[in-house]
Image (tube, rainbow, N blue to C red):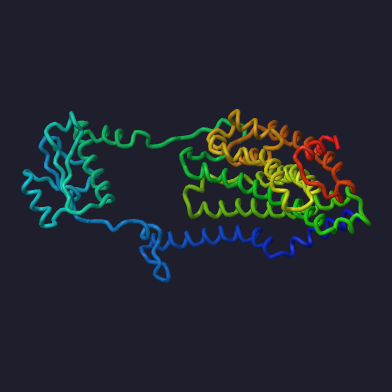
Amino acid sequence: MKKTMVILRHEVITLVRRFSFWFGVLGIPLIGFLILVGISILNRSQANGNTPPGGFPGFGQLFSPEEDLRPQGYVDQAGLIREFPSSFDRNEMIAFPEIELAKQALDSEQISAFYIIPPDYVESGTVRMFIKERNIFQSESKSESLAELLQYNLIGQDPEMYAAVSDPIRDVEMVNLAPESRPARDPNGPLTFFVPYIVMMVFFISIMGSSTMLLNSVAKEKENRILEILMVTASPHQILMGKIIGLGLVGLLQVVIWVASAILLMRMGGQTFVQLENFQLEPSLLGWGVVFFVLGYIVYASLMAGIGALVPSLRESSQATTIVTMPLIVPLFVISALIQSPNGGLSTALSLFPLTAPTTMMLRLSAANVPLWQILLAIALLVITSLLVIRAVAGMFRAQTLLSGQQFKMKRFFLALIGKI
């Protein structure tokens, strides 16, 4: 145990002394915080009608085209437009009795465009628009104004019917029948997709990054013959456990900081973005995240350690790494289906299968209410898988295997994994 702790401490100290490690752990949350602060400043400046310090415009000023305040006109040959809605700005649309008068107003730049509503409009639904300069943004906006006028008059100038047709669903009250209630989320909102996607990517990167560090550590020490020196004082099993636990603690620190930062940033963002008010990550997500990261890391880090024990050099590990990590990549190919139906059959199956459970279950937990029995079953299956994989990989960590320089072959790796070598 003492020798295992020495190796553990060496791995932790070596990694936390790297600037790149702390840049990844703290830099990403810091960047998110700075973006949130910057957007908040821009929104406040734009709301007050001011330009932020330095003359940089807000997002609305930066991307919105310059608005043409001139009205548009129309010639109603079908005789449909008789009244205006009470909320309609009459200065937006000017009626002309003849086409020539409308053309004169357009030539003198009194209006920016005019429409002709032909006599057969009801049958064809077609209007003609006359302009002097092409501006797709202004044209679309003004066309909507004409559409409002036509809609109001086509339904018989009935204000209540017009309001119902214009906005048929004024309010949606969502009732969550799940055992554990959480705030209702807009199914069409962008955050409904992006938040679970980001959570899944965080755990994918964390598990893969920590596992790959173990592979690099074993393969490099084997290639540089440092393992030969370590094995003089420590057994292969002690080396394996020291490296797995040491790098796992560092990876766990990274996950805790990232998930806690995400929860904090979303709570802070709720004061700036209306969409974030009803899309908050549950604090329990941090606890479940620790459990699934630890178990997922043990499975994949052990497999990576087995690859490192068999490859003669780090350069030859790419093929085996791709095959071993393929199960963890599979959910990324169907991530849209998983987010759209987080409690569907595919999502449930992938969240229970041990090799895909760490990332898929975290996606489900961030997107919907997951039954507790499924979470506990996924954890139980991961624990069993972790014990089996550690036992199999421990067989590869033998002096004969670690010190051999045989060429790596996938057949040999799988045979060793099932104890046939």
Q: Residue furthest bottom?
A: 54
| Residue 166 horizontal side relative to residue 124, left or right | right
| Residue at (54, 62) in percent of width and height | 34
Instruction: Find residue 60 and report its horizontal and vertical position in percent.
Output: 37, 57
Q: Is residue 268 above or below residue 383?
A: below
Rendered view: 43 above or below 193: below
In the displayed orientation, state which residue is furthest to the right.
233
> In terms of image quadrants, where is residue 116?
top left
Viewer-closest of 222 and 53: 222
Which quadrant would residue 330 be assigned to in this image?
Answer: top right
Quick one: 354 or 415, which is closer to the camera? 415
Q: What residue appears at the point 69 percent right and 60 percent down from the top-left corner?
A: 21
Could you say where residue 187 lies in the image, as x and y percent from the top left? Answer: 48, 37
Of 370 and 395, nearer the camera is 395
At x 75%, y 46%, the residue is 304
User: Residue 300 vs residue 73: left or right?
Assistant: right
In the rendered structure, the answer to whether residue 303 lies left or right of residue 264 reads right
| Residue at 63% from the left image edge and 31% from the top image edge | 348
In the depicted structure, whether residue 239 falls above or below residue 80 = below
Nearer-the-camera pick, 397 or 194: 397
Give residue 47's position: percent from left, percent from top: 39, 59
Place of residue 195 in the rendered image (x, y in percent of width and height, measured from the top left): 55, 45
Q: Quadrant of the C terminus?
A: top right
State how many labels appear. Answer: 0
